[in-house]
Image (cartoon, rainbow, N blue to C red):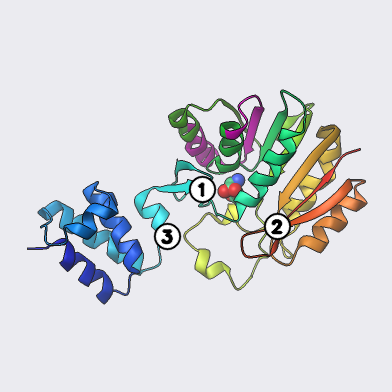
Protein backbone atom coordinates (compact mmCIF):
# COMPACT_ATOMS: atom_id res chain seq x y z
CA UNK A 1 0.00 0.00 0.00
CA UNK A 2 1.27 3.47 -0.86
CA UNK A 3 0.57 6.30 1.50
CA UNK A 4 1.25 9.96 0.70
CA UNK A 5 4.25 9.74 3.02
CA UNK A 6 5.59 6.78 1.01
CA UNK A 7 5.21 8.68 -2.23
CA UNK A 8 7.20 11.56 -0.76
CA UNK A 9 9.88 9.16 0.45
CA UNK A 10 10.01 7.65 -3.04
CA UNK A 11 10.43 11.16 -4.48
CA UNK A 12 13.31 11.79 -2.11
CA UNK A 13 14.99 8.57 -3.22
CA UNK A 14 14.65 9.74 -6.84
CA UNK A 15 16.09 13.12 -5.81
CA UNK A 16 12.92 14.92 -6.86
CA UNK A 17 12.52 18.26 -5.12
CA UNK A 18 10.02 17.96 -2.26
CA UNK A 19 7.88 20.87 -3.42
CA UNK A 20 7.73 19.41 -6.95
CA UNK A 21 6.66 16.06 -5.48
CA UNK A 22 3.93 17.76 -3.47
CA UNK A 23 2.73 19.65 -6.52
CA UNK A 24 2.55 16.40 -8.51
CA UNK A 25 0.59 14.76 -5.69
CA UNK A 26 -1.68 17.79 -5.57
CA UNK A 27 -2.25 17.37 -9.32
CA UNK A 28 -3.03 13.64 -9.16
CA UNK A 29 -5.11 13.72 -5.97
CA UNK A 30 -6.81 17.02 -6.79
CA UNK A 31 -6.24 18.17 -3.23
CA UNK A 32 -4.47 21.34 -2.09
CA UNK A 33 -0.96 21.04 -0.72
CA UNK A 34 -2.21 22.13 2.70
CA UNK A 35 -4.43 19.04 2.77
CA UNK A 36 -1.56 16.76 1.71
CA UNK A 37 0.63 18.10 4.50
CA UNK A 38 -2.00 17.26 7.10
CA UNK A 39 -2.90 13.84 5.66
CA UNK A 40 0.31 12.07 4.79
CA UNK A 41 -1.00 8.81 6.26
CA UNK A 42 -3.78 8.62 3.67
CA UNK A 43 -3.41 5.80 1.15
CA UNK A 44 -3.45 6.34 -2.59
CA UNK A 45 -5.62 4.20 -4.83
CA UNK A 46 -3.75 1.89 -7.14
CA UNK A 47 -4.23 4.13 -10.14
CA UNK A 48 -3.23 7.23 -8.18
CA UNK A 49 -0.09 5.47 -6.96
CA UNK A 50 0.94 4.39 -10.44
CA UNK A 51 0.20 7.86 -11.83
CA UNK A 52 2.31 9.49 -9.14
CA UNK A 53 5.14 7.01 -9.64
CA UNK A 54 5.19 7.65 -13.40
CA UNK A 55 5.18 11.43 -12.95
CA UNK A 56 7.95 11.30 -10.34
CA UNK A 57 10.02 9.20 -12.71
CA UNK A 58 9.58 11.73 -15.51
CA UNK A 59 10.37 14.62 -13.19
CA UNK A 60 13.51 12.78 -12.03
CA UNK A 61 14.55 12.59 -15.68
CA UNK A 62 14.30 16.34 -16.06
CA UNK A 63 10.87 16.95 -17.57
CA UNK A 64 9.67 20.35 -16.40
CA UNK A 65 6.96 20.30 -13.75
CA UNK A 66 4.66 22.46 -15.87
CA UNK A 67 4.55 19.87 -18.65
CA UNK A 68 3.73 17.16 -16.11
CA UNK A 69 0.88 19.05 -14.51
CA UNK A 70 -0.07 20.76 -17.79
CA UNK A 71 -0.30 24.18 -16.22
CA UNK A 72 1.73 27.20 -15.19
CA UNK A 73 0.75 30.39 -13.43
CA UNK A 74 1.76 33.61 -15.16
CA UNK A 75 0.98 37.13 -14.02
CA UNK A 76 -1.93 35.90 -11.89
CA UNK A 77 -3.47 33.73 -14.62
CA UNK A 78 -3.41 29.94 -14.65
CA UNK A 79 -2.37 28.89 -18.17
CA UNK A 80 -2.44 25.46 -19.73
CA UNK A 81 0.81 24.45 -21.34
CA UNK A 82 1.94 21.55 -23.52
CA UNK A 83 5.37 20.70 -24.93
CA UNK A 84 4.31 22.71 -28.01
CA UNK A 85 4.84 25.96 -26.10
CA UNK A 86 7.56 27.54 -24.05
CA UNK A 87 6.74 27.48 -20.35
CA UNK A 88 6.03 31.09 -19.34
CA UNK A 89 8.77 32.49 -17.08
CA UNK A 90 8.45 34.92 -14.18
CA UNK A 91 11.15 37.03 -15.93
CA UNK A 92 8.61 37.84 -18.62
CA UNK A 93 6.39 39.53 -16.05
CA UNK A 94 8.89 42.41 -16.26
CA UNK A 95 7.85 42.91 -19.89
CA UNK A 96 4.16 42.71 -18.97
CA UNK A 97 4.49 45.22 -16.13
CA UNK A 98 6.33 47.68 -18.35
CA UNK A 99 3.70 47.26 -21.08
CA UNK A 100 0.87 47.80 -18.56
CA UNK A 101 2.50 50.99 -17.30
CA UNK A 102 2.70 52.30 -20.88
CA UNK A 103 -0.91 51.34 -21.56
CA UNK A 104 -2.00 53.28 -18.46
CA UNK A 105 -0.72 56.51 -19.94
CA UNK A 106 -1.56 55.69 -23.57
CA UNK A 107 -4.60 55.84 -25.86
CA UNK A 108 -8.00 54.80 -24.50
CA UNK A 109 -8.42 51.80 -26.77
CA UNK A 110 -4.87 50.78 -27.59
CA UNK A 111 -4.04 48.34 -30.36
CA UNK A 112 -1.61 45.81 -28.93
CA UNK A 113 0.36 43.08 -30.69
CA UNK A 114 2.19 40.10 -29.15
CA UNK A 115 4.67 38.59 -31.61
CA UNK A 116 5.45 34.92 -30.97
CA UNK A 117 2.73 34.45 -28.41
CA UNK A 118 3.43 30.78 -27.55
CA UNK A 119 1.02 29.85 -24.74
CA UNK A 120 -0.50 33.32 -25.10
CA UNK A 121 1.01 34.36 -21.77
CA UNK A 122 1.83 37.99 -22.57
CA UNK A 123 -1.22 38.71 -24.72
CA UNK A 124 -3.56 37.20 -22.14
CA UNK A 125 -1.98 39.02 -19.20
CA UNK A 126 -2.26 42.34 -21.05
CA UNK A 127 -5.89 41.79 -22.07
CA UNK A 128 -6.74 40.66 -18.54
CA UNK A 129 -5.25 43.73 -16.90
CA UNK A 130 -6.15 46.24 -19.62
CA UNK A 131 -9.51 45.09 -21.03
CA UNK A 132 -10.00 48.10 -23.31
CA UNK A 133 -7.00 47.03 -25.41
CA UNK A 134 -7.57 45.26 -28.72
CA UNK A 135 -5.01 42.49 -28.58
CA UNK A 136 -3.62 40.55 -31.54
CA UNK A 137 -1.33 37.58 -30.99
CA UNK A 138 0.79 36.00 -33.71
CA UNK A 139 2.69 32.74 -33.73
CA UNK A 140 4.32 30.70 -36.46
CA UNK A 141 3.40 27.41 -34.79
CA UNK A 142 -0.09 26.10 -35.38
CA UNK A 143 0.20 23.83 -32.35
CA UNK A 144 1.23 26.73 -30.11
CA UNK A 145 -1.62 28.85 -31.41
CA UNK A 146 -4.11 26.11 -30.46
CA UNK A 147 -2.78 26.16 -26.90
CA UNK A 148 -3.03 29.95 -26.76
CA UNK A 149 -6.54 29.94 -28.21
CA UNK A 150 -7.70 27.36 -25.67
CA UNK A 151 -6.23 29.47 -22.87
CA UNK A 152 -8.04 32.57 -24.12
CA UNK A 153 -11.30 30.70 -24.34
CA UNK A 154 -11.01 29.19 -20.89
CA UNK A 155 -10.11 32.54 -19.35
CA UNK A 156 -12.82 34.37 -21.29
CA UNK A 157 -10.34 36.82 -22.82
CA UNK A 158 -10.97 38.10 -26.32
CA UNK A 159 -7.78 37.97 -28.39
CA UNK A 160 -7.33 37.91 -32.16
CA UNK A 161 -5.01 35.03 -33.05
CA UNK A 162 -3.10 34.93 -36.33
CA UNK A 163 -0.83 32.24 -37.73
CA UNK A 164 2.28 33.81 -39.22
CA UNK A 165 5.98 34.38 -38.95
CA UNK A 166 6.68 37.67 -37.17
CA UNK A 167 5.28 40.60 -39.16
CA UNK A 168 3.87 38.45 -41.97
CA UNK A 169 0.88 37.96 -39.69
CA UNK A 170 0.26 41.71 -39.38
CA UNK A 171 0.32 42.98 -42.96
CA UNK A 172 -0.80 46.61 -43.32
CA UNK A 173 -1.64 46.89 -39.64
CA UNK A 174 -0.48 49.42 -37.10
CA UNK A 175 -0.24 49.15 -33.36
CA UNK A 176 0.22 51.41 -30.37
CA UNK A 177 2.23 48.80 -28.50
CA UNK A 178 4.12 45.77 -29.76
CA UNK A 179 5.59 43.27 -27.32
CA UNK A 180 7.60 40.15 -27.90
CA UNK A 181 9.51 37.51 -26.01
CA UNK A 182 11.11 35.93 -29.07
CA UNK A 183 13.59 33.06 -29.17
CA UNK A 184 16.96 34.59 -28.30
CA UNK A 185 19.36 31.82 -27.36
CA UNK A 186 22.40 31.32 -29.59
CA UNK A 187 22.73 27.97 -31.36
CA UNK A 188 25.13 25.85 -29.33
CA UNK A 189 24.60 27.84 -26.12
CA UNK A 190 25.52 25.89 -22.98
CA UNK A 191 22.06 26.44 -21.45
CA UNK A 192 20.25 24.53 -24.22
CA UNK A 193 20.65 20.97 -22.88
CA UNK A 194 18.74 21.97 -19.74
CA UNK A 195 15.91 23.27 -21.95
CA UNK A 196 15.68 20.16 -24.15
CA UNK A 197 12.03 19.49 -23.31
CA UNK A 198 10.86 22.86 -24.64
CA UNK A 199 10.32 23.61 -28.36
CA UNK A 200 13.57 24.56 -30.04
CA UNK A 201 11.62 26.98 -32.26
CA UNK A 202 10.75 28.99 -29.15
CA UNK A 203 14.32 29.05 -27.84
CA UNK A 204 17.04 29.49 -30.45
CA UNK A 205 17.53 32.11 -33.12
CA UNK A 206 20.67 31.94 -35.21
CA UNK A 207 24.35 31.82 -34.30
CA UNK A 208 24.22 34.85 -32.01
CA UNK A 209 20.61 34.39 -30.89
CA UNK A 210 19.63 37.75 -32.36
CA UNK A 211 17.99 36.73 -35.67
CA UNK A 212 14.42 37.05 -34.42
CA UNK A 213 15.15 40.30 -32.56
CA UNK A 214 16.67 41.76 -35.74
CA UNK A 215 13.66 40.66 -37.84
CA UNK A 216 11.26 42.20 -35.35
CA UNK A 217 13.11 45.51 -35.02
CA UNK A 218 13.73 45.97 -38.74
CA UNK A 219 10.06 45.89 -39.72
CA UNK A 220 8.64 47.43 -36.56
CA UNK A 221 8.57 51.04 -37.83
CA UNK A 222 6.10 50.10 -40.59
CA UNK A 223 3.71 48.72 -37.96
CA UNK A 224 3.92 51.26 -35.17
CA UNK A 225 1.60 54.21 -34.76
CA UNK A 226 3.37 57.47 -34.04
CA UNK A 227 4.56 57.43 -30.40
CA UNK A 228 3.97 53.66 -30.34
CA UNK A 229 6.26 51.47 -28.28
CA UNK A 230 8.16 48.29 -29.03
CA UNK A 231 9.19 46.20 -25.99
CA UNK A 232 11.45 43.19 -26.38
CA UNK A 233 12.62 40.53 -23.99
CA UNK A 234 16.15 39.24 -24.63
CA UNK A 235 19.04 37.30 -23.14
CA UNK A 236 21.01 38.41 -20.08
CA UNK A 237 23.92 39.64 -22.22
CA UNK A 238 21.98 41.12 -25.15
CA UNK A 239 20.66 44.44 -23.83
CA UNK A 240 23.43 46.49 -25.44
CA UNK A 241 22.85 44.78 -28.80
CA UNK A 242 19.12 45.33 -28.66
CA UNK A 243 19.51 49.00 -27.67
CA UNK A 244 21.88 49.42 -30.64
CA UNK A 245 19.37 47.76 -32.98
CA UNK A 246 16.57 50.06 -31.81
CA UNK A 247 18.71 53.20 -32.03
CA UNK A 248 19.92 52.27 -35.52
CA UNK A 249 16.29 51.77 -36.60
CA UNK A 250 15.47 55.30 -35.39
CA UNK A 251 13.70 54.60 -32.09
CA UNK A 252 13.63 57.20 -29.32
CA UNK A 253 13.53 56.75 -25.52
CA UNK A 254 15.49 53.52 -25.84
CA UNK A 255 15.89 51.90 -22.43
CA UNK A 256 16.37 48.58 -20.64
CA UNK A 257 14.47 47.14 -17.64
CA UNK A 258 15.76 44.55 -15.21
CA UNK A 259 14.11 41.26 -14.31
CA UNK A 260 13.57 39.93 -10.78
CA UNK A 261 17.20 38.84 -10.60
CA UNK A 262 18.41 42.36 -11.48
CA UNK A 263 19.46 41.36 -15.01
CA UNK A 264 18.73 43.68 -17.95
CA UNK A 265 16.09 41.52 -19.60
CA UNK A 266 13.81 43.77 -21.52
CA UNK A 267 14.62 46.64 -23.89
CA UNK A 268 12.24 48.98 -25.61
CA UNK A 269 11.89 52.18 -27.53
CA UNK A 270 9.31 54.58 -28.83
CA UNK A 271 8.63 55.24 -32.48
CA UNK A 272 8.64 58.96 -33.10
N1 LIG B 1 5.36 34.78 -25.54
C1 LIG B 1 5.49 33.52 -24.90
C2 LIG B 1 6.06 33.70 -23.51
O1 LIG B 1 6.55 34.73 -23.18
C3 LIG B 1 6.33 32.55 -25.73
C4 LIG B 1 7.73 33.02 -25.96
C5 LIG B 1 8.53 32.07 -26.83
O2 LIG B 1 8.04 31.02 -27.25
N2 LIG B 1 9.74 32.44 -27.10
O3 LIG B 1 6.02 32.82 -22.70
Task: Note whether ligand 1 is within 8 Å of mark 1.
Answer: yes
Is there CB contact under 8 Å for labels 1 and 3? no
Q: Is residue 109 above or below residue 142?
A: above
Residue 42 image point, x, y percent: 11, 57
> Which residue does the numbered mark 1 point to in the structure image?
85
Label located before the other in sequence (1 or 3) = 3
> Which residue does the numbered mark 2 point to in the structure image?
234
What residue do we see at 47% from left, 60% from top? 197
Is there CB contact under 8 Å for labels 3 and 2? no
Q: Is residue 141 magenta?
A: yes
Label located before the other in sequence (1 or 2) = 1
Q: Is residue 45 magenta?
A: no
Depth order, front residue of 231/38: 38
Q: Quadrant of residue 41?
A: bottom left
Residue 149 image point, x, y percent: 50, 32
Which mark identifies residue 64?
3
Task: Note whether ligand 1 is within 8 Å of mark 2.
Answer: no
SS label for mark 1: loop
Left or right, 87 with reference to 257: left
Boundaries of the magenta span: 129-149
What residue do we see at 55% from left, 54% from top? 89
Residue 107 image point, x, y percent: 77, 26
Left or right, 252 with reference to 237: right
Which mark identifies residue 208?
none
Q: Is residue 143 above or below residue 205?
A: above
Depth order, front residue of 55/121: 121
What residue do we see at 61% from left, 60% from top? 260
Label located before the other in sequence (3 or 2) = 3
Q: Is residue 58 above or below residue 78?
A: below
Give the Cα distance between marks 1 and 3: 12 Å
Give the Cα distance between marks 1 and 2: 18 Å
Depth order, front residue of 207/75: 75
Amino acid sequence: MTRIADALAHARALRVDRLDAQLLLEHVLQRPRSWLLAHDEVSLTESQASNVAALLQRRAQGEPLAYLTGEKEFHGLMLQVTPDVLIPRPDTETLVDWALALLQGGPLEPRVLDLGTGSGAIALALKHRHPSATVTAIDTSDAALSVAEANAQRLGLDIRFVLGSWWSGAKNQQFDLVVSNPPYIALGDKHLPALRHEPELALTSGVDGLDALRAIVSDAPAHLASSGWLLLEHGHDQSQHVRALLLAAGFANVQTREDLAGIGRCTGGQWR
